[in-house]
Image (spheres, rainbow, N blue to C red):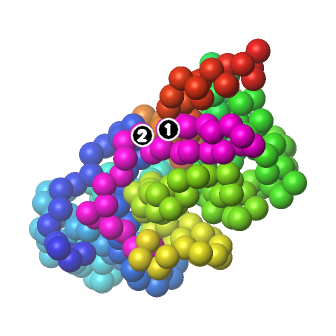
């Protein structure tokens, strides 16, 4: 199936962030400067034909074509309908609106803002409740925005190379995962873990730009086979994403679950993801409980 092939429209309000960005992985991406370029890039990223998209928003395919070539100018309502049909992230919907000549519709915000405080408190409570098992808050660029006590203890293993604090942290989950100075030497199932991580990047990236930036970031690290980089539609991701780590003499077995805000009203809220690690066996659970005690 080509990038113009017929595919179903992505479902709305997905709790699990599973999105395909094959086109961006295989094509050099330059930031678009017009609404038509933005529209075309998202349609291709979602692997939709013009007819597919036109059917989803109940408009003639010719109109979608005219919007992409600039022969027609979209209304504000048309921009929002197109963005919703393609499940475009809220921050990128603002970009679509700006390139069409309209003001932003979705508030960006910061974690430190008053509007985000309630959400931040809820996420913090969820992470504290998950102790003594590790939990991280990650943004759309894979920066670690927060971590619970157990996750901080895990980060202490690599603190010499990747220091972490709440205020001035620039810690990135991709760096600490793929760097030889990060968690990589501690992960005993490295080949399986790394390959599945790259496939998750394809599926979890919120936009083609995010995907390209993530792949470029990972590519600077050594010893990653070339056949891992493209989206493998036949590769079956494990629903539990196993991680096997060796800390000294102790083997720790985890599985990872990634969740996002189900019904966000602002772009930052949509982009925050909570990654939680659960013990995959009794020995790991007991070891973590003993450490907490």
Residue in view at x 44 percent, y 71 percent: 228
Residue in view at x 31 percent, y 61 percent: 235
Q: Position of residue 251 (x, y in %)?
A: 63, 39
Name the residue furthest top.
293
Rounded to the nearest whole Å, what is the CA distance between mark 2 and mark 1? Answer: 5 Å
**Disc ID at residue 255:** 1
The answer to whether any part of residue 291 appears in the image is: yes
Residue in view at x 31 percent, y 55 percent: 236
Residue range corresponding to the magenta coloring: 229-255
Residue in view at x 31 percent, y 43 percent: 12
Name the residue furthest front.
249
Name the residue furthest right.
160
**Disc ID at residue 240:** 2
Q: Secondary structure at mark 2?
A: loop
Of the pair 130 and 189, the residue shown nearer to us: 189
* Magenta-drawn stretch contains 230: yes
Q: Is residue 170 left or right of residue 179?
A: right
Q: Are marks 2 and 1 in contact (CB under 8 Å)?
A: yes
């Amino acid at each position: 199936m080509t990038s113009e092939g017929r595919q179903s429209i992505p479902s709305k309000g997905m709790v699990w962030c599973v999105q395909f960005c094959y086109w961006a992985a295989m094509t050099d991406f330059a930031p678009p400067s017009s609404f038509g370029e933005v529209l075309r890039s998202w349609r291709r990223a979602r692997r939709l034909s013009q007819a597919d998209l036109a059917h989803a928003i109940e408009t003639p395919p010719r109109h979608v074509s005219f919007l992409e070539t600039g022969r027609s100018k979209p209304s504000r309502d048309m921009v929002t309908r197109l963005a919703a049909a393609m499940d475009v992230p809220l921050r990128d919907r603002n970009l679509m609106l700006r390139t069409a000549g309209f003001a932003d519709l979705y508030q960006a915000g910061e974690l430190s803002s008053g509007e985000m405080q309630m959400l931040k408190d809820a996420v913090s409570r969820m992470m504290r409740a998950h102790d003594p098992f590790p939990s991280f808050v990650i943004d759309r660029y894979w920066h670690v925005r927060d971590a619970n006590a157990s996750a901080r203890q895990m980060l202490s293993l690599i603190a010499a190379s990747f220091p972490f604090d709440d205020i001035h942290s620039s810690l990135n989950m991709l760096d600490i995962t793929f760097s030889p100075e990060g968690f990589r030497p501690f992960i005993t199932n490295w080949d399986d873990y790394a390959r599945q991580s790259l496939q998750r990047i394809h599926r979890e990236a919120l936009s083609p730009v995010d995907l390209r930036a993530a792949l470029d970031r990972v590519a600077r690290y050594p010893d990653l086979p070339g056949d891992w980089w493209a989206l493998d539609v036949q590769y079956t991701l494990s629903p539990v994403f196993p991680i096997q780590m060796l800390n000294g003499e102790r083997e720790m077995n985890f599985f990872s679950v990634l969740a996002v805000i189900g019904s966000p009203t602002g772009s930052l809220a949509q982009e925050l993801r909570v990654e939680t690690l659960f013990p995959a066996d009794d020995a790991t659970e007991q070891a973590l409980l003993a450490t907490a005690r």
